[in-house]
Image (spheres, grey):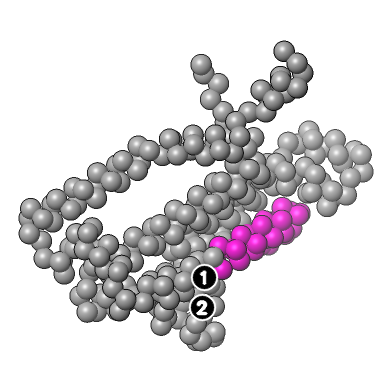
Amino acid sequence: MSPAAGAARDDGPGVVERAAAALVYYVPSLLVILALLVLWQVAVMVLGVKEYILPSPIAALRALGNPNYQWTANLLATLYAVLGAFLLSAVLGVLLAIVIVWNDLLLRTVMPVLILFNTLPKIALAPLFVIWMGYGIWPNIVIGTTIAFFPMVVNTAVGLASAEPEMLDLVRTLKASRWQVLKKIRFPHAVPYVFVGLKLNATMSVIGALVGEFVASEKGLGSLIITSGVTMETAPIFASLLLISVMGLLLYGVVVAVEQVVAPWAHREDTTD
């Protein structure tokens, strides 16, 4: 066997192979979801449940074709708020984590403030952001950021602080600066922790954006849910929940896909035959 052939064999599976393996991995979950939807549809039909109490999955899907609900405008409004909250909380989370681990004084100063802020009920802060910033997408982004950034801070800080002490002692004896230690040692070690925070961030950003839309918003899926609840139209409520779930799953999937490309070594491989 030639060296080139041996090197090609040791490269491991490609992106397509990993994507196919991930799809196969989630097949049982997809089957369970499909079975639950079928059971839901059958139960509504057999029991004769009124649509305003519990619509069937088909009725919810049918509501997606109703132009009166302005699905495109509402979906885009929620999507912009979710993406804005996700990106802003990710950047702020990493920066605050760096500040926390920079020295012990900053750790003792910043972390208690963050914990205190995280204990505040965000639903109570939402009206304040609306008063300060007015109606629009920015209050929803800020509310989503306040909900999503804390897990990002904690996970990144844990990753930065858990670098191997022996390695840190070695680079310090070589007179490495604090920035060089952060760049060369701490941050590469924290990459898996950062992606854990991003995965939590992907779901928390959706929740945060919806909280903002529930409080005060003229557009968005959260606003549509509120107005549909007032008029007792449950089909668009379930259709909105479906779109919200898909949005969160897609954002989570993008984070997982980026992690597979940026840090495939972070995943423990199956060594059994």
Q: Amino acid at mark 1?
A: Tyr
Q: Which residue is rendered at x = 59% and y = 53% of the image? A: 154
| Residue 128 drawn at (x, y percent) | 49, 82
Q: Which residue is mark 1?
A: 80
In the rendered structure, the answer to whether residue 182 lies left or right of residue 220 reads right
Provide the residue span drawn in magenta. Answer: 84-110
Q: Amino acid at mark 2?
A: Ile
Q: Which residue is rendered at x = 41% and y = 39% of the image? A: 26
**Contact (CB < 8 A) between labels 1 and 2?**
yes
Q: Which residue is rendered at x = 28% and y = 46% of the image? A: 34
Label 2 environment density (alpha carbons within 10 Å; few <14, some 14–19, many ≥20): many
The reply to whether the magenta stretch includes residue 42 is no
- Front residue of 136/190: it is 136
**Image position of 146 with respect to 31: above or below:** below
Q: How many marks?
A: 2
Is label 1 in a helix, a strand or a loop?
helix
Q: Which residue is mark 2?
A: 137
**Image position of 238 with respect to 159: above or below:** below
Q: Which mark is residue 237?
A: none
